[in-house]
């Protein structure tokens, strides 16, 4: 039956977490906007106000940032006038504010800003940590004109009325959250809490993306389950006894808080009383006694029930309690009363265990863990007053959630102390957030920044196209002699070489009526070759071609060959291209200024390979545009975002200053990776970009590429992470030797870390491979850094592309341009966003 209750609790929790079903849920699963537990670095003076059943407690807490080992605490309790609980809301908050003023006057507090945490043990709908509307009163409170109002605002206004302008209400929480935060003190985080007192509730750290009622999507957020209302929709009707029904009918809120009425100390004495009344009516107890007293509500207190359960003194306590009511119990009566008290309290413990097991199983599943190991803070007069309650809670939880290992931690000063921790953590996170934002601010580009980049790109394009101005342009705008895009009727068999990075591809391509057929093989070019001599590089290329032709029986055929050569070249014809500069880590000597087709043919002669007929040399950007154009005639732009970045597009011949002729169009290879090499992007470049640039083999060159492409993004992230570690904002400021190694943080990690829905556990695993012991908060921050760097790269790419499409539209005198962009490159293909 308890497994069934656990299953129903899980269903109720899912209902409360979902935006679609939240309104109908009894287990409300309210976001608390508490996103972290203490880490021991919290410091400063804090004020806590705790609203209790019959009093208000004010605390002054000083934290020293020493792992919270020796906090200094002062407090004072102010008794609450009886009429306040049912009076006007304004009177309640004015009373609390007067208590704060009296307390501060008594300790001559300094007048610096004093953050205040408010423990308000009622159901609230939070929209921020310091903004929460009361959903409903409980526990005997019913102050007017408070439900639906912002509790923080009501308290802050009352405090301001007392002219305590230096006191700021920073955080509002319920007692359950306070318990969780208190039990996080011993250096180990506590991520679940359970309160069973006059009311009952639980809270736990959920994965933020599952809390649909909050806007947060990364990291964790504490959720207050509000499980006291579990069963208000009838889901517990099959376990409710006639005694429970009687207790419910006599309560101030019949039909509500059904779970709370089965487990909380406010009702257990009443359940026992109804059982005794029923058994006395059946003459099974108290024969010969006048049992009318048992019909009086509240004659049996929970404290008496707990004392009766005690095996040693319990029988004597039962006799004392029953005789005090005017009953004349026999030995057997005392024994049976003890059994009944044990049964009622044991049932409360097992039901709490079913609820706790549901929470633990949910956490285990949502974090995709085989085994969850977690600390559970418990604040409960039942737990404190009766060791058996804790034993049952522990053993039944283990039975119902065997995949979870929960350690129960008794709360020392649950609420008030916990509120101080919530407030301290909120201040720590706010300070850290400010510092992180300062570090990342230079990488966050506004729309105006991007429009400026677009305008600069357009300006550089015009300079690059002009015959006289080309030499001063950072965007070279090289003619490709490709003057038309495919129309789909092209046929034939071709050999293709593709040199674009450390991998070299040889392909056999057959274009037929029934489509394109390809065979290819990838050959690796070792760094020793890419940075050796040109002769060795081109000899290696020819050896790869010969190997491929041998494998495909092509040694006897001379096929037309297309050579994709993805480096800046000045084309003097379709089959003649002079290398202007190496990029992407290549630096082979004796190649710059040479015709690459000539270099290829010379290598073929050296290797006595005579069957090469090079028809066209194209840049990979042009290749991309042409291959996409075969399927979509509107494709007139090619874009590469991979190891490097570049773009090409179809320009009007009359605008191409370097080539004679006015008619038609020619594809222009922009070589936009060098955009900014003349300093026009210096204000976009951050200190992190400069650090990356200085360590490259072409410092000061390919500036735009170094902001965007896969070869550099991981390095930018690595430098940002090092800066955050130095500022003690990441990995607790501990040294990270592996992170000092150039190239260790690969761009593929960005792609993996940014996958939506990727559990932070998997992000932590990626970081662990780099020997980085990351907390959940660290993982969230690393993800944010990756997202910031990737977003900027994509936005800059978009600004460049916007300049290209605007130019094409204006060239053609169109109000609207419909154009397709063919895109290739590992970053574009592998990155989730």
Image (cartoon, helix red, strand yellow):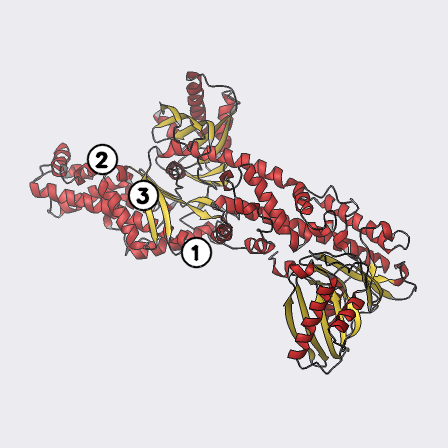
Q: Which residue is mark 2?
A: 303
Which one is nearer the viewer's eye here, 420 or 237?
420
Residue 813 pos. (x, y %): 86, 59
Q: Which residue is mark 3?
A: 408
Judge whether 693 appears above or below 155 on screen: below
Image quadrant where residue 334 sits: top left
Judge whether 669 appears above or below 725 on screen: below
Residue 123 pos. (x, y %): 42, 40
Mark 2 and mark 3 residues within 8 Å of each other at the beta carbon: no
Mark positioned earlier in the residue sequence (2 or 3): 2
- Label 3 crowding class (10 Å Cα cut-off): few <14, some 14-19, many 20+? many
Horizontal relation, residue 633 to residue 522: left or right: right
Query: Callout 1: helix, strand or loop?
Result: loop
Q: CA distance from mark 2 to mark 3?
A: 22 Å
Q: Residue at x 8, y 43 (%)?
A: 332
Query: Callout 2: helix, strand or loop?
Result: helix
In the rendered image, the residue lying farthest to the right is 661
């Amino acid at each position: 039956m308890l497994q069934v209750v656990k299953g129903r609790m899980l269903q109720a929790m899912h209902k409360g977490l979902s935006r679609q079903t939240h309104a109908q849920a009894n287990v409300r699963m309210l976001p608390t906007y508490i996103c972290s537990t203490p880490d021991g670095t919290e410091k400063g003076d804090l004020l806590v106000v705790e609203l209790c059943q019959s009093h208000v407690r004010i605390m002054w807490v000083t934290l020293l940032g020493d792992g919270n080992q020796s906090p200094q605490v002062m407090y004072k309790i102010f008794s609450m006038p009886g009429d306040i609980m049912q009076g006007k809301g304004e009177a309640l908050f004015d009373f609390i504010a007067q208590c704060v003023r009296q307390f501060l006057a008594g300790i001559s507090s300094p007048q610096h800003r004093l953050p205040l945490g408010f423990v308000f043990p009622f159901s609230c709908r939070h929209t921020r940590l310091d903004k929460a509307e009361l959903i409903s009163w409980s526990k005997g409170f019913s102050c007017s004109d408070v439900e639906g109002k912002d509790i923080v605002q009501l308290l802050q206004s009352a405090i301001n009325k007392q002219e305590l302008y230096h006191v700021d209400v920073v955080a509002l929480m319920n007692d359950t959250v306070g318990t969780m935060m208190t039990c996080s003190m011993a250096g180990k985080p506590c991520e679940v809490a359970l309160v069973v007192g006059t009311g009952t509730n639980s809270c736990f750290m959920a994965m933020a993306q599952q809390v649909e009622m909050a806007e947060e999507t990364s990291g964790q957020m504490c959720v207050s389950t509000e499980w006291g209302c579990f069963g208000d929709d009838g889901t517990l009707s099959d376990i409710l006894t006639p005694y429970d029904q009687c207790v419910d009918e006599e309560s101030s809120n019949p039909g509500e808080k059904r779970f709370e009425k089965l487990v909380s100390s406010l009702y257990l004495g009443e359940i026992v009383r109804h059982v005794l009344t029923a058994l006395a009516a059946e003459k099974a107890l108290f024969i010969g006694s006048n049992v009318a007293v048992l019909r009086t509500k509240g004659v049996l207190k929970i404290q008496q029930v707990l004392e009766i359960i005690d095996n040693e003194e319990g029988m004597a306590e039962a006799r004392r309690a029953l005789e005090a009511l005017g009953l004349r119990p026999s030995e057997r009566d005392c024994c049976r009363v003890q059994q009944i008290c044990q049964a009622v309290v044991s049932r409360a413990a097992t039901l709490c265990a079913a609820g706790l097991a549901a929470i633990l199983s949910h956490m285990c599943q949502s974090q995709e863990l085989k085994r969850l190991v977690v600390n559970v803070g418990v604040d409960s007069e039942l737990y404190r007053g009766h060791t058996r309650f804790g034993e049952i809670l522990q053993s039944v939880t283990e039975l119902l959630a065997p995949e979870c290992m929960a350690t129960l931690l008794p709360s020392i000063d649950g609420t008030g102390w916990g509120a101080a921790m919530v407030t301290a953590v909120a201040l720590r996170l706010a300070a850290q957030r400010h510092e992180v934002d300062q570090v990342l601010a230079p990488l966050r580009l506004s729309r105006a920044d991007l429009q400026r980049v677009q305008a600069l790109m357009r300006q550089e394009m015009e300079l690059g196209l002009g015959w006289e101005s080309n030499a001063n342009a950072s965007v070279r705008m090289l003619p490709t002699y490709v003057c038309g895009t495919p129309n789909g009727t092209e046929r034939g068999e071709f050999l293709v070489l593709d040199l674009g990075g450390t991998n070299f591809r040889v392909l056999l391509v057959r274009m037929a009526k029934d489509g394109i057929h390809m065979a290819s093989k990838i050959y690796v070019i070792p760094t020793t070759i890419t940075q050796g001599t040109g002769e060795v590089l081109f000899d290696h290329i020819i050896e790869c071609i010969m190997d491929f032709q041998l494998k495909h029986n092509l040694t006897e055929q001379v096929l037309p060959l297309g050579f994709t050569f993805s480096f800046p070249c000045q084309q003097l014809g379709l089959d003649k291209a002079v290398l202007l500069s190496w990029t992407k880590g290549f630096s082979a000597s004796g190649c710059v200024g040479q015709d690459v087709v000539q270099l290829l043919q010379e290598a073929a002669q050296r290797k006595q390979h005579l069957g090469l007929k090079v028809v066209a040399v194209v840049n990979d950007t042009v290749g991309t545009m042409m291959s996409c154009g075969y399927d979509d005639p509107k494709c007139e732009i090619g874009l590469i975002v991979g190891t490097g970045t570049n773009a090409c597009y179809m320009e009007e011949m009359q605008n191409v200053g370097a080539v004679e002729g006015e008619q038609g169009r020619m594809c222009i290879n922009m070589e936009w990776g060098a955009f900014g090499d003349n300093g026009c992007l210096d204000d976009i470049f951050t200190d992190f970009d400069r650090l990356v640039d200085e360590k490259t083999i072409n410092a000061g060159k390919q500036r735009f590429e170094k902001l965007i492409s896969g070869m550099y993004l991981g390095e930018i992230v690595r430098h940002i992470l090092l800066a955050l570690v130095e500022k003690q904002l990441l990995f607790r400021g501990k040294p990270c030797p592996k992170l000092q190694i150039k190239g260790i943080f690969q761009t593929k990690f960005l792609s993996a870390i940014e996958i939506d829905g990727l559990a932070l556990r998997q992000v932590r695993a990626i970081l662990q491979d780099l020997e980085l012991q990351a907390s959940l908060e660290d993982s969230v921050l690393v993800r944010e850094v990756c997202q910031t760097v990737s977003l900027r790269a994509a936005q800059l790419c978009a600004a460049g592309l916007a300049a290209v499409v605007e130019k094409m539209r204006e060239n053609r005198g169109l109000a609207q341009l419909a154009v397709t962009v063919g895109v290739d490159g590992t970053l574009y293909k592998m990155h989730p966003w």
